[in-house]
Image (cartoon, rainbow, N blue to C red):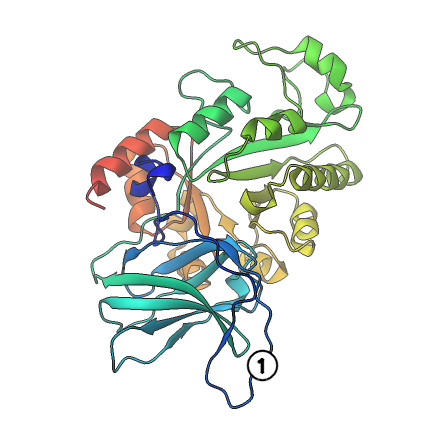
């Protein structure tokens, strides 16, 4: 657990990682049915806590590789008299994460956790569940926008990326768009100044010569940015695919970005978002290992869930102004993402169980959450 950094321990929801352990592929036990079923499990790199503090309806996450839609969590008490409990959320099972909602009425105990696939069971190991009716579920963690820029690192720079990784945050967001010669680049703005041309009209060689940040970096290619991730596999990457001048170019950028993530072997730690609904649906159709979030306002974001998006990024004001809708989204079991920058805003997201907290003020989030929840 130490390898994830002490700070990270204060900002996670129901899962506080307890290190990685590889489980043998194909390890199957049957649930007692008279008709055994051959079920193939290829689950590895499982990360989960040895002890969870939680309340009923709290989200419980287990991370690993090889989960499938349709899988569910089963917990079995190691004491007599408590039968197995299935936490069935098949729509929220992804290849690198499985999610369950803690049911009512379970006592404090040591439980064995299983993945249930059909009638087959795959043991994930044991964990102690400690129930507290007053417990407020912890978020997954902080995701600084465009890296950790508070010490002066430029937005979307490799320096900002490395600072975010070194801070031990849950993830870091970055933006991608196209150069004039169809090279994916990491940049938020469509153009660097009012009177400058659009970046998608300039070949990358010219971009690299024309634009330099105060730290000496230029606008990086996506390949250079992903190379800088290095061997780190604990910090998630939230890639925002920006709209280009045409739908065709935007979807082409999506293809190139997905290919780059695959080339660098980062599928298991990458999540995706866009204001372009077709981009989200294109990514969702590939059954990605990560989450997909639609950034634009819809009449009902649950339509986006049904269409294939798997987390909901929303403005905090929208949640506050429409509590009934907020309650529906929380009940869906899909991770919720909103922003916070001030102590008051962090108080709200913590009280309301927001899963992913985007921020432009990472130091505020780290200090506030650490101060408030250091006992955990």
Residue 128 x, y percent position in the rendering? 27, 62
Q: How crowded is mark 1: few (under 14 residues within 10 Å), some or many (20 or more)?
A: some
Residue 364: quarter of image:
top left
Residue 89 x, y percent position in the rendering? 48, 67
Residue 234 x, y percent position in the rendering? 46, 40
Residue 199: quarter of image:
top right
Q: Can residue 196 be seen in this view?
A: no
Residue 145 x, y percent position in the rendering? 48, 31
Looking at the picture, tell me which residue is in the foreground, 213 or 107.
107
- The residue that label 1 is drawn on is 37
Question: In the displayed structure, does residue 78 sit left or right of residue 204?
Answer: left
Q: Residue at x 56, y 66 (%)?
A: 26
Question: In the displayed structure, does residue 120 sit left or right of residue 342?
Answer: right
Q: State whether residue 218 is above or below residue 141.
A: above
Q: Residue at x 56, y 44 (%)?
A: 271
Q: State whether residue 71 is above or below residue 300.
A: below
Question: In the displayed structure, does residue 247 sit left or right of residue 8?
Answer: right
Quarter the N terminus occupies: top left
Q: For the residue labelled by badge 1, is the local secondary structure a helix, a strand or a loop?
A: loop
Extreme residue toward the front, this view: 24
Q: State whether residue 187 is above or below residue 89.
A: above
Q: Is residue 159 visible?
A: yes
Extreme residue toward the bottom, this view: 34
Q: State whether residue 15 is above or below residue 40.
A: above
Question: In the displayed structure, does residue 352 sit left or right of residue 278?
Answer: left
Residue 55: quarter of image:
bottom left
> How many marks on residues?
1
């Amino acid at each position: 657990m130490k390898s994830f950094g002490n700070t990270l321990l204060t900002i996670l929801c129901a899962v506080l990682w307890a290190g990685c352990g590889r489980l043998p592929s194909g390890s199957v036990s049957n649930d007692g049915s008279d008709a055994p079923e051959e079920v193939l499990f290829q689950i590895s790199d499982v990360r989960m806590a040895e002890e969870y503090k939680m309340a009923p309806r709290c989200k419980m996450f287990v991370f690993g590789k090889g989960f499938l839609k349709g899988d569910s969590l089963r917990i079995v008490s190691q004491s007599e008299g408590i039968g197995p409990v299935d936490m069935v959320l098949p729509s929220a099972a992804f290849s690198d994460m499985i999610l369950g909602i803690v049911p009512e009425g379970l006592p404090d105990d040591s439980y064995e956790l299983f993945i249930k696939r059909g009638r087959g069971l795959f043991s994930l190991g044991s964990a102690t569940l400690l129930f507290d009716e007053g417990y407020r579920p912890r978020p997954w963690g902080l995701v600084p926008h465009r890296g950790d820029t508070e010490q002066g690192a430029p937005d979307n720079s490799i320096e900002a990326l490395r600072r975010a990784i070194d801070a031990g945050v849950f993830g870091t967001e970055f933006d991608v768009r196209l150069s004039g010669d169809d090279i994916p680049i990491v940049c938020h703005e469509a153009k660097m100044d009012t009177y400058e041309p659009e970046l998608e009209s300039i070949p990358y060689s010219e971009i690299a010569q024309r634009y330099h940040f105060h730290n000496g970096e230029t606008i990086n290619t996506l390949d250079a940015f992903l190379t800088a991730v290095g061997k780190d596999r604990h910090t998630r990457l939230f890639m925002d695919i920006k709209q280009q001048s045409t739908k065709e170019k935007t979807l082409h950028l999506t293809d190139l970005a997905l290919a780059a993530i695959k080339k660098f072997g980062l599928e298991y730690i990458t999540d995706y978002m866009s204001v372009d609904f077709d981009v989200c649906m294109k990514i969702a159709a590939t059954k990605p290992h990560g989450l997909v979030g639609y950034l634009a306002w819809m009449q009902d974001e649950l339509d986006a869930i049904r269409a294939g998006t798997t987390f909901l990024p929303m403005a905090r004001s929208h949640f506050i102004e429409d509590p009934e809708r907020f309650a529906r989204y929380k009940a869906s079991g899909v991770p919720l993402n909103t922003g916070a920058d001030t102590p008051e805003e962090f108080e709200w997201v913590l009280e309301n169980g927001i899963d992913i907290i985007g921020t432009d003020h990472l130091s505020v989030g780290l200090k506030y959450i650490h101060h408030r929840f250091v006992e955990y």
